[in-house]
Amino acid sequence: MIIVGDIGNTETKICLINSKNKIIKRFNLKSKNINFSLLKKIFKKTKYYKTDVKKCLFSSVVPKTFNTIKYYFEKFYIIKCFELKNLPLNKLIKIKVNKKQVGSDRIANALGVLNKNKNYIILDFGTATTFDVLINNVYHGGVIAPGVNLSLKTLINKASLIPNLNLKKTNKVIGLNTISAVRSGFFWGYNGLIDNIMGLIKKETRKSFKIVATGGFSYLFKNSLKSNIKINKDITINGLIRAASLIKHKK
């Protein structure tokens, strides 16, 4: 069994993976709440506590949280815990940009769809909305735009008369009140942003792409974009599972 996880600015996912590379246990945690005591508490409650874990690998954009998790697993599981970008990734994928300037989650996403016969744009609705370009198993970089939820929360916090609300798909553009106007602006605004950026990527590269989307708002936009998109909520975890093959020793 192996442990893999993705540490994001908002949420951290930790998964236990069996010998057939299937997820057998999943933990979704708020990144800001993670500490040594919490990890000890939740893992003690599972039957997998102190089982024969052979590898431990995380992608992380929050170094402090990774260090906490690393310390926990290395202390209780007596196993070295790796961060994705410290592995020899060139054995799996060619990265044409400065690896230090690309989030580990974005590299994991690219690893999650590797297919030498297809080109991909990976659309990730996280704290930021990211677009990553993969051509013939070569990572070419991408685009980072403001996250949908982050933008909504900022607007609500800064505008006194806008109430808390959840985003929904809307068929009408013109809102009849504040809530419907905000929902329209975010839904159709991000719909246009996504379509435009993907169109520009295709124009600049002169390539066709398969579009894979992940993250909380992927389902909201799935059927409204000009391009056909496939939802894969575990693309990051799948990439980490693939990268774990680069780890040769337990300790």
Image (cartoon, grey):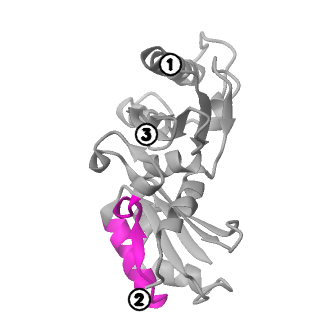
Relative horizontal placement of residue 165, taking residue 141 as reference (left or right): right
| Residue ID at (45%, 39%) | 138
Q: Residues within 10 Å of mark 2 (few under 14, many from 20)?
A: few
Q: Which residue is mark 2?
A: 75
Q: Nearer the viewer, mark 3 or mark 2?
A: 3
Q: Amino acid at mark 1?
A: Lys
Residue 217 shows up from this direction: no
Is residue 171 placed above or below 138 in the rendered structure? Answer: above
Q: Is residue 82 magenta?
A: yes
Q: Which residue is mark 1?
A: 202
| Residue ID at (60%, 9%) | 174
Residue 209 location (% of width, % of height): 58, 26
Residue closest to the far top: 174
Residue 125 shows up from this direction: yes
Residue 140 location (% of width, % of height): 40, 35
Q: Which residue is mark 3?
A: 139
| Residue ID at (71%, 25%) | 223
State how far apart marks 1 and 2 are (Cα): 47 Å
State how far apart marks 1 and 3 are (Cα): 15 Å
State how far apart marks 3 and 2 are (Cα): 35 Å
**In which image quadrant can residue 208 be found?**
top right
Q: Is residue 73 magenta?
A: yes
Secondary structure, mark 2, is helix
Q: Main secondary structure of the magenta part?
A: helix
Q: Which residues are magenta?
A: 64-88
Residue 134 location (% of width, % of height): 49, 36
Q: Amino acid at mark 2?
A: Lys
Query: Which comes sooner in the sequence, label 1 or label 2?
Result: 2
